[in-house]
Image: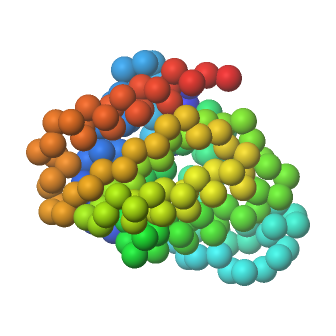
């Protein structure tokens, strides 16, 4: 199984650490995993032209273009975002918007996905953020295999929480085992 893991955090911290742990879990089950940290990619948001949606090709060409092509060829996704104001980060939202050309014909239908939400807010806030990612998956016809919310205040809280690391690893393992 080929898995693309995407972290929408603007900094190196909890979200990235948990993505790496989930990737290790998936690798332990034989999956090939490639991690993309959106903060390291220079990319624009959606240009807002309907042509992309109808033609199925994004007109914007930048560093997210190869990631979208790799998603087209992968079997599974790990989508991780910090929880900002009950929602995904701006980086993750811009990334999601750029997938518009792939949703009309459900080009990613049949893929599997795992969601991770990380943040210092309440459980209710994390659920709302997770729901945004779940809606994104539903729009694309991607099957949700599992979802985890991790409450963390400081930038290294996840690293020090053995239970969080274990749960992230298990989430990655479960995704890798969820073959068609």
Question: How far from the left and from the top, in percent, is residue 9?
Answer: 35, 63
- In the image, is 4 to the left or to the right of 169? right
Location of residue 148 with respect to 97 vertically, above or below: above
- Tally of marks: 0
Location of residue 98 with respect to 107 vertically, above or below: below
Question: How far from the left and from the top, in percent, is residue 23?
Answer: 38, 35
Give the quarter of the image for residue 27. top left
- Residue at image position (40%, 75%) is 85
- In the image, is 148 to the left or to the right of 52? left
Question: How far from the left and from the top, in percent, is residue 38?
Answer: 43, 62
- Which residue occupies the extreme bottom position in the image? 48
Front in this rendered view, residue 125 or 18: 125
- In the image, is 121 to the left or to the right of 131? left
**Image quadrant where one finds the C terminus:** top right
Front in this rendered view, residue 50 or 166: 166
- Residue at image position (49%, 37%) is 146
- Which residue occupies the extreme front position in the image? 124
Front in this rendered view, residue 37 or 65: 37
Please indicate, yes or no, whether residue 86 appears anywhere in the rendered image.
yes
Give the quarter of the image for residue 56. bottom right
**Image quadrant where one finds the N terminus:** top right
- Residue at image position (43%, 18%) is 29
Please indicate, yes or no, whether residue 63 appears anywhere in the rendered image.
no
Question: How far from the left and from the top, in percent, is residue 57?
Answer: 78, 62
- Which residue occupies the extreme right position in the image? 54
- Which residue occupies the extreme left position in the image? 160
- In the image, is 68 to the left or to the right of 121? right
């Amino acid at each position: 199984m080929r898995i693309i893991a995407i972290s929408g955090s603007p900094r190196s911290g909890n979200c990235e650490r948990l993505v790496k742990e989930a990737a290790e879990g998936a690798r332990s089950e034989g999956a090939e995993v490639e991690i993309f940290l959106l903060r390291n990619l220079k990319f624009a948001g959606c240009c807002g032209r309907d042509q992309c949606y109808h033609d199925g090709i994004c007109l914007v060409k930048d560093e997210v273009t190869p990631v979208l092509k790799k998603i087209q060829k992968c079997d599974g996704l790990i989508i991780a975002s910090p929880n900002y104001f009950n929602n995904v980060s701006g980086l993750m939202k811009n990334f999601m918007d750029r997938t518009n050309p792939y949703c009309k014909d459900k080009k990613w239908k049949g893929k599997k996905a795992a969601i991770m939400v990380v943040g210092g807010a309440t459980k209710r806030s994390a659920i709302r953020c997770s729901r945004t990612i779940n809606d994104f998956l539903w729009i694309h016809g991607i099957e949700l295999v599992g979802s985890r919310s991790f409450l963390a205040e400081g930038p290294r809280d996840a690293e020090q929480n053995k239970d969080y690391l274990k749960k992230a690893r298990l989430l990655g393992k479960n995704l890798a085992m969820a073959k068609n």
